Image: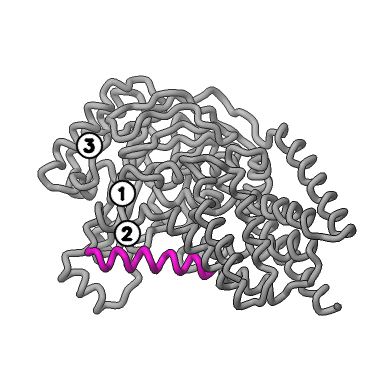
Amino acid sequence: MARGRLVAALAGLLLPLAFAPFGWYWLAPLAMLALFATWDVAPAEAARRGFLFGACAFGAGTWWLYVSVRLVGGTPLPVALLLLAGLVALMAAWYAACGYLAARWSTRSVALDACLLMPGLWLLGEWLRGWVLTGFPWLSIGYAMVDGRLAAWAPVGGVHGVTLVTTVMAGAVLTLARGGTRDRTVASALLLVATLATWLLSGHSWTTASGAPLRVSLVQGAIPQLLKWQPGERRATMERYYDMTTPLAGRDLVVWPEAAIPAPDDRVGDYLQALRVLAASLDTQLLVGILTHDAERDEYRNSLLALGAEAGVYHKRHLVPFGEFFPVPAFVRSWMRMANLPFDDIAAGGRQQRPLLAAGVPLAPTICYEDAYGTEQLEFLPEARLLVNVSNDAWFGDTIAPHQHLQIARMRALETGRYLVRSTNTGITAIIDQRGRLRATIPQFEPRVLSGEAQPYEGATPYVRTGNYPVVLLALLAIAVAVLVRRRR
């Protein structure tokens, strides 16, 4: 029993190494194989092992949350530790549930359990934790595979499709090690089919280039988060972004990061007018991150303003809990106010918004954390031909989080078959092509401008057309087959 728990804990500790910035993606299926191998026990013990795996994985893989809420956000130490421990425990609970059900519904067939039941439960749990209670999709297995062969499945089934194939293949390898002759035959066939299908998908293009490449410039202001909202720093920040943009004449698109202007739009009207004049003189479309104020409702939104010939605005729809809104009772808000902690909510934008435009090219915008949710941008597709993300990863400091966030953005490009341009405050600012490859980046924490070309693409990948539903239905079908076999036996 102790040995199984140790294996689960070690597998969880090793899993974050499969993700950026380490990039040892082959550890992801190995970790899955090791965890699945420990679930051949009673349901309660399998749940404990699943919880241990999840606690170790998220403790090692999302420790940067402490930097965000304590060192940058200034949250009191007990509250910061409580939030981190609560999130880790909540994430680990999903893995505990998977372990419990895998043991509870075991068919006693190695092939059925390892290749159908466990991957199906894992995928369903990963999908649910991506949206239940607003969701936290960090460390989803598919993201680790961006640089691996199995990334070819992303345009077909999205990140969850990659996860499903990865876990099925891990289960097949486990079956080869533990199963009888019939089980091994089934596992060998699965591995052969998955390998051939991956090879065929690797050479297929789902979208096609549309028109000439856009000349883009991404402005990275590198304003430290501790200074960003200081009233005495506002003028210097706005001047920095203005001065960095002035030389960018003739660009089709210039993008500033999330909340690059450290004040609501109704307090910097003259500055915004100066930016409109600048955009016209440069003959460019300028996208600017800023808070916008709806005076009629007295609501603030996290927005992306399009200044130039094709004016527009996008309001962030998927907000960050305890960062942009606070799902707590009124008495807790009162305590937060007394403790000098943030307590006001930002309002979410409407679900139905139009793409922004640059040189006539429709753009699918996302702001910061939104790009961790693949379905957030599907409402703009297939009309949009280029993805744009603005972020402020200064909250994460010099940790592994900005690298993980960039890896997630690369998956969004892969899923949709489109370039993604990503402008951040402190990095990692990047141009990503339609296959999720990094075309250009600039160093973190330095005020720089990244200039290059971004090719618009048209068409729709299978994932753009169907979203997550086919993969989720496959997972449910796999679980149903295993349960029916168990009952029959």
Check disc 3 and report the residue beneath it: 273
Residue 93 x %, y %: 51, 70
The colour scheme is: one colour
Check disc 2 and report the residue beneath it: 323
Q: Nearer the viewer, residue 103 or 341?
A: 103
Q: Nearer the viewer, mark 2 or mark 3?
A: 2
Going by the image, does 429 lie left or right of 68?
right
Instruction: Indicate the amino acid at tag 1.
Output: Trp
Vertical relation: 167 (above or below) 443: below
Q: CA distance from mark 2 to mark 3?
A: 30 Å
Residue at 55%, 32% (x, y): give it. 437
Residue at 24%, 46% (x, y): give it. 225
Residue 212 x %, y %: 54, 22
Which mark sits nearer the N-terminus, 2 or 1?
A: 2
In which quadrant will I find the C terminus? bottom right
Instruction: Indicate the amino acid at tag 2.
Output: Gly
Which mark sits nearer the N-terminus, 2 or 3?
A: 3
Q: Nearer the viewer, residue 139 or 236?
A: 139
Q: Nearer the viewer, residue 231 or 116?
A: 116
Check disc 1 and report the residue beneath it: 395
Instruction: Write the start and end of the magenta stretch as one range.
Output: 76-94
Question: What secondary structure characterizes most of the magenta part?
Answer: helix
Residue at 78%, 59% (x, y): give it. 178
Q: Nearer the viewer, residue 281 or 478?
A: 478
Callout 1: SS? helix
Residue at 36%, 34% (x, y): give it. 255
Q: Quarter-wise, where is residue 45 in the image?
A: bottom right
Q: Marks 1 and 2: in contact by CB < 8 Å?
A: yes
Q: CA distance from mark 2 to mark 1?
A: 10 Å
> What is the crowding at mark 1: few (fewer than 14 residues within 10 Å), some, or many (at least 20)?
many
